Image (cartoon, rainbow, N blue to C red):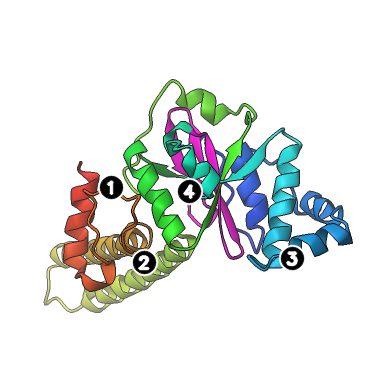
C-alpha cells in the first residue's frame, strides 16, 4: 500500500488531489489548475452556465479537470448517462472513475488487479473488492454523486506495476481525516486520565500497582477499540447502508442503517465482509 500515491485533503484543493491521485504523482499544482481555469473564455463560461442542470461552479470545475486530462489524452464520460447505461458495461472492466458531489472530487482507480478508493478525505487508500465495486458506485449515485469514467491510457506508475505481480490485503480500513483527529484527541484524553489514576494510586498502598496498571490499560484499549468500531460503522452506514437501488446486489441488506441498532449493523457488516 505504501507504493500507492495518495494526496490527503488540504484546504479546498480536492480537484488537484483528485487528478494527482488518478495519475499517481504530483502532476498538477494549484497554480497550474488556476492557469487552465483562466484559459476558459467568457463565452465558454456563459455557455456552461446555461441549461440550469448544475451550477456554473460545477461546470467550470468539470471543464478544468477535462482540459487538464486532455494533456494526457484522457477524456471523461458520464457513467450514469442513459447512453452509457445502454452499453451495459460492467464497471469492473473500466480502469478508473472520477466522482463528484457538490464541491468535492475524488478518484476510484484500478491499480494492478485491484480497485482502490483514493478519496483525499481518507487517511489512506481504501481497498475495494471486485464484488463491492458495483455496490459502492450505486451507493454514490443514490447519494447524489456524479460519476465519470476516465477513458484513455493512464501514465505508467510504480503502484500499478507492483500490484500487477502481487495482491494486497487491508486489515484495517482507513478512516476519514476528521475521525482520525477525533480519535487522537480521545486517546490523549485517555492517556491523561490513565496518568492521573496511576499518580493517585502511587502512594496509597491500597492497590497493587501492577494489577491497577493492567486494569487501566485494558480499559483504555477497550474504549479505543470501541471508538474505532463506531467510526467504521458510521462510514459503513454512509457508503453501504443508506438504502437500496436497482443496481445493488440482492444479497446485501437493503434496510436503512438509521433503523438498526449498532449491534445489528455490526453483525450485517461483518457478515458481508466474511463472504
Instruction: Please give the residue where the numbered disc 3 appears in the rendered image.
Output: 50
The one nearer the camera, 26 or 240, is: 240
Q: From the image, state whether disc 3 or disc 4 is nearer to you.
A: 3
Question: Disc 2 on helix, strand or loop?
Answer: helix
- The alpha-carbon separation of the residues under discs 3 and 4 comes to 38 Å
Above/below status of 31 relative to 3: below
Point 14% across, 76% down: residue: 205
Local secondary structure at mark 1: loop
Residue 153, given in percent of the width and then of the height, sits at 63, 28
Query: Which of labels 3 and 1 is toward the front?
Result: 3
Give the mark nearer the N terminus: 4 vs 2: 4
Q: Along the horizontal axis of the image, is 211 left or right of 129? A: left
Give neighbour class at mark 3: few <14, some 14-19, many 20+ (Cα, 10 Å).
few
3D distance between C-alphas at marks 1 and 4: 27 Å
Look at the numbered discs 1 and 4 and tell me whether their residues touch, using CB distance below 8 Å.
no
Residue 55 location (% of width, % of height): 67, 68
Can you tell which quarter of the image residue 274 is in?
Answer: top left
Residue at the disc numbered 2: 187
State which region is magenta. Answer: 94-123
Q: Position of residue 221 (x, y in %)?
A: 25, 61
Mark 4 or mark 2, whichever is nearer to me: 4
Q: Is residue 70 left or right of residue 241?
A: right
Which circle marks residue 249 in the picture? 1
Q: Determine the main secondary structure of the stretch shown in magenta.
A: strand
- Looking at the image, is mark 1 or mark 4 earlier in the sequence? 4
Of marks 1 and 4, the one in the foreground:
1
**Spatial CA span between label 3 and label 1:** 37 Å
Return the mark for residue 124: 4
Amino acid at each position: 500500500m505504501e507504493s500507492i500515491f495518495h494526496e490527503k485533503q488540504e484546504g479546498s484543493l480536492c480537484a488537484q488531489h483528485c487528478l494527482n491521485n488518478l495519475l499517481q504523482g504530483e502532476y498538477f499544482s494549484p497554480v497550474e489548475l488556476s492557469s487552465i481555469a483562466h484559459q476558459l473564455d467568457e463565452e465558454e463560461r456563459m455557455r456552461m452556465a446555461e441549461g440550469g442542470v448544475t451550477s456554473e461552479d460545477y461546470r467550470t470545475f468539470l471543464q478544468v479537470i477535462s482540459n487538464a486530462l486532455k494533456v494526457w489524452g484522457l477524456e471523461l464520460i458520464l457513467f450514469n448517462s442513459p447512453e452509457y447505461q445502454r452499453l451495459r458495461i460492467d464497471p469492473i472492466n473500466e480502469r478508473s472513475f472520477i466522482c463528484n458531489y457538490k464541491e468535492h472530487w475524488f478518484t476510484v482507480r484500478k491499480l494492478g488487479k485491484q480497485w482502490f478508493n483514493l478519496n483525499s478525505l481518507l487517511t489512506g487508500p481504501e481497498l475495494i473488492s471486485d464484488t463491492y465495486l458495483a455496490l459502492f458506485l450505486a451507493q454514490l449515485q443514490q447519494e447524489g454523486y456524479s460519476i465519470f469514467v476516465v477513458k484513455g491510457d493512464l501514465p505508467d506508475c510504480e503502484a500499478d506495476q507492483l500490484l500487477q505481480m502481487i495482491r494486497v490485503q487491508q486489515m484495517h480500513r482507513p478512516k476519514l481525516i476528521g475521525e482520525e483527529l477525533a480519535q487522537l484527541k480521545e486517546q490523549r484524553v485517555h492517556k491523561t486520565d490513565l496518568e492521573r489514576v496511576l499518580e493517585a494510586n502511587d502512594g496509597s498502598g491500597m492497590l497493587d500497582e501492577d494489577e491497577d496498571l493492567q486494569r487501566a490499560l485494558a480499559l483504555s484499549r477497550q474504549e479505543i477499540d470501541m471508538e474505532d468500531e463506531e467510526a467504521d460503522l458510521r462510514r459503513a452506514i454512509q457508503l453501504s447502508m443508506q438504502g437500496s437501488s436497482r443496481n445493488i446486489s440482492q444479497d446485501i441488506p437493503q434496510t436503512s442503517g438509521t433503523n438498526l441498532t449498532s449491534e445489528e449493523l455490526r453483525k450485517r457488516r461483518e457478515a458481508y465482509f466474511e463472504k
